[in-house]
Amino acid sequence: MRRGLFGSTIVRLTLMLVLAQVAALALGLTVIHRFTAAAILSDARTAAEVARDDLIDDYRQLGLSGLIEAIEYRLKARDDRNFVVLLKAPDGKRLVGNLHEWPATVADTANWRQRLLTREGATAPEPIGVVTTRLPGGYALLTGETLETQRQLAEASETAFFYAIGVGLLIAVLMATLVAWILARRIDVFSRAANAFVGGRLDARVERDDTGDAFDRLALSINAMFGRIAGLVRELRMVTDSMAHDLRSPVSRMKARLEQALGRTEDADAQTAIAGAIEEVDGLHRLLDTALEISRAEAGIGRDQFARFALRPMLDDMAEVYGPLAEDRGFAIAVDAAPGLDIFAHRELLVRALSNLVDNALKYAAGGSVIRIGARKAGDGEVELTVSDDGAGLSQSQMAEATRRFVRLDPARGGTGAGLGLSLVETIAHLHGGAMHLEANSPHGLVVRLTLPITPARL
């Protein structure tokens, strides 16, 4: 079952990398903003406390008039525009400063506070940090610094934050995409080798880059596994091929002796028994021939006989050959193939594969009336051969079992097959670099599709 785009491990890994990089960038920018704001706030507090201490010294040395004069001087200084000060008398009257009045929420003696206050000449309150102290004689002094710089920093930081997140997101996506592309390329190397190996190329191996990294070590292990499997398969094929080849001669001799015995006896029962034995020997002979064909096709024997030919004439010839037999069994043979469709393949093996499929349809498509042989261009560089019927068809579980060797789905349905027909068809498809698929026909019946490259990549 397909899980969609986000079911892909590569896509999920890419998203995780993007999110991780964006989160790290956001965290870094937030920390920088907080530390910068704290540093500016600390500078403003230090400036307010230093101004307070200087004015207290002026009051002690010069008295009230000297303090007022020092305050007025500071207010006139152009380089101290953020300075805030207010001096009030013991009765609460404002004596000098650049605030309209003493803040109601600030005591006469208070450490650093941040308040929204309105300075003289301003039309709106602004954030100001202040410290207050009580002077001898009942006077109260307030000094502070406007926090406009901090506000501007916050606005600039917010703007920079979004710009940085946007740029960082773009860079993160590009980097994550690059990483995903690199991983996908490395994984594709394994996938191609595995697909080739499954397709019958037992000499297929994963390309190594000799870097010694995890992928290279994995390739080394997979290649060792492929080599071991290929050796076992070759040994099994050799045994199967040898057994099938060695058994053909005794089977042929057995048939010859049975035919001699049939000609010598005049007993009807004996003749019937001998004729049945000859039929069984013929079935065994066909089984051995098919087993040999499968073994040779799996070994790649026959690739040197590939040639380019047109598919439509081949299918028409098959329909002509099978027409009378199909008519006797109540079927019609129909060909559906576009003229001019060529393929580079082993003609005799393709005929054998399609013949097996037509034979199966004639035997098992009970209740059907038409067997269709088709050919069409399936995609870029591929052709699709089909044999379909409108019989009873197969269930999904039966389709899964149908290509297993020596498996007969329903022995009660009759026939002399040994369960190798579809296996041979699939092997021939693999020899051509293609694949075989079984599907339900609409509205009923079975379709067998052979998807083959028009020109195999490897001969």
Image: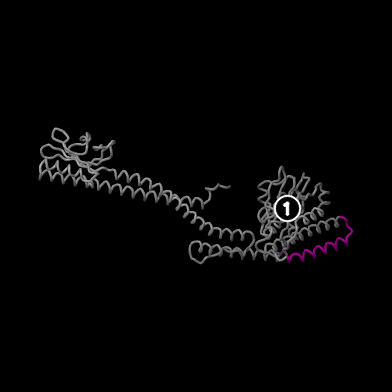
Q: Which residues are magenta?
A: 243-268
Left or right: where does residue 32 sit relative to residue 349? Answer: left
Looking at the image, what colour scheme do you see? one colour
Pinpoint residue 252: horizontal percent, then vertical percent: 79, 64
Helix, strand or loop under label 1: strand
Pinpoint residue 115: horizontal percent, then vertical percent: 26, 38
Left or right: where does residue 125 sit relative to residue 288? Answer: left
The three-letter code of the residue at mark 1 reads Ala
Relative to 274, does residue 140 appear above or below in the rendering? above
Badge 1: few (under 14), some or many (20 or more) residues near its Cα, within 10 Å? many
Res 86 → quadrant? top left
15 part of magenta stretch: no
| Nearer to the camera, 124 or 434 | 124
Pinpoint residue 127: horizontal percent, then vertical percent: 28, 40
Q: How many marks?
A: 1
Left or right: where does residue 317 sit relative to residue 16? Answer: right
Pinpoint residue 164: horizontal percent, then vertical percent: 40, 50
Q: What's the magenta bit mostly, secondary-structure-wise?
A: helix
Left or right: where does residue 281 sit relative to residue 139? Answer: right
244 part of magenta stretch: yes
Which quadrant of the rendered structure holds the C terminus? bottom right
What residue is shown with label 1?
Answer: 375
Relative to 360, does residue 225 appear above or below in the rendering? below
| Nearer to the camera, 7 or 231 | 7
| Nearer to the camera, 333 or 92 | 92
